[in-house]
Amino acid sequence: MIRPAELIQRKRDGGELEAGELAELVLGYTRGEVPDYQLAAFLMAVHFRGLSEAETFALTDAMVRSGETIDFAAELGRRVVDKHSTGGVGDKTTLAVGPIVAACGVPFGKMSGRGLGHTGGTLDKLESIPGFRVELSTEQFVAQVRELGLAIVGQTADLVPADKKLYALRDVTATVDNTSLIAASIMSKKIASGANAIVLDVKVGDGAFMKTLADARVLGEAMRALGGRAGRDVVCVLTDMDQPLGCAVGNALEVREAVSTLVGEGPPDLAELVFDAAAHLLALSDLGLDRVEARRRAERLVDDGPAAAAYRRWVRAQGGDPDEEALPKAPVIHEVFAPDDGHVGRLAALPVGLAALHLGAGRRSKDDLVDHAVGVVCKRKRGDRVARGEALAEIHARDEETAREACETVLAAYELVDEPPPQQPIVLDTLA
Ligand code: URA
């Protein structure tokens, strides 16, 4: 039997733990045999001292073993692909990538999360579709990926229970923002949920966990190493989150924008990221395509209609109504007007995310109900020209008061300048 206090002390003093010791600590904690206060002290020691690559893998492996796992290759006899984003503002990429990849004939199976703070979550966006069920059993999830080629569901209670407990503890002990702990948390869920190839979208900027490209690269490399050790192919794209992705921020608004992207009418930055991620996934699949051909195929399936048809089939399969008219609409819409002529020099993602959160698009506490109709539509983005009095953004609100507050926050997120700023690509770097 391990003595948790000895392990805490060794990590506190900069020492290294054996894989077996880490496993006993984490699995003991998940079973309720090691108390919160000892894990909290351990997490803080990790926060200051870090984990080696071997320790990070041992932690991830123990977390995977804390619950059930899916083996898609054995279940389907095919390679299944998955994508994950570290969280941003207006990130509806998955809603478009899943149907495109499925339309190409590659099985896509993903377990998603809910919004966290100012960042949106795929499950909340999906639940804005009337009737859509995100709670499928593991058997239903696997069967839908087998039969339809596409399923996006909530994480089942039995998958990586260690992460649920550890994440909740990290959240209240100021130990979330440690690269090894984030990498282990994300990759344990990706490995346990069974995909063979994964595209990880690491967001960088004021609206993301990772504020600098250098930090994002360290996280991306750590996650790639974990995936590699677990026999998964992982590509990491590092993408711009200094402004919201696309225009819409808020659940039903984002679903509409994803649907537009599936018929070739999405905002350019979102469309670029969607095709980039889809091309990586198709190139990692068992179709035997290179990335150039994969991208061409993805673009053709959007232009010709099969991607939108795959979306409709998938939404119906999970009980939802795919008709855009069925999505909820907010009763109050206000515009945010430009105070001057100029170019948008900056559109900060964080305040836009916070404005959407305060409108009711996210949760301020765990039990808050989400209002799926509300949010922000950024009609002008970085580099766009605007004349005084033209609309910069639209606020979709449940009442006048929250609309007015959001107008102020969103106006402050815009910085107008005389000259257009240098253009920045959406994909800043790729780790492959
Ligand atoms: N997302 C996760 O799933 N885990 C983290 O630790 C951070 C972001």
Image (cartoon, helix red, strand yellow):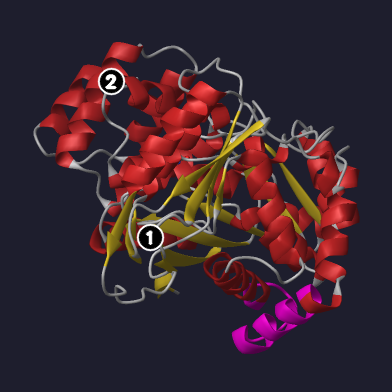
Asked whether residue 57 is in view, the answer is yes
Element type at marker 2?
A: helix
Q: Nearer the viewer, residue 248 or 289?
A: 248
Res. 40 mark = 2
Q: Earlier in the sequence, mark 2 or mark 1?
A: 2
Q: Nearer the viewer, residue 177 or 344?
A: 344
For the point 49% across and 25% down, the residue is 402
Q: Is residue 287 found left or right of 325 in the rendered image? A: left
Asked whether residue 116 is in view, the answer is no
Residue highlighted by disc 1: 220
Identify the amino acid type marked 2. Ala
For the point 30% across and 47% down, the residue is 179
Measuring from the top left, give residue 37's x and y in whole percent.
28, 12
Q: Quadrant of residue 177?
A: top left
Measuring from the top left, give residue 234's x and y in whole percent.
51, 65
Q: Which residues are magenta?
A: 283-302
**For discs 2 and 1, the disc positioned in front in the rendered view:** 1
Say few, some or many: other residues with alpha carbon within 10 Å of mark 2 (under 14 / 14 to 19 / 20 or more).
Answer: some
Q: Is residue 246 found left or right of 43 in the rendered image? A: right
Query: In the displayed image of the protein, which residue is found farthest to the front?
Result: 389
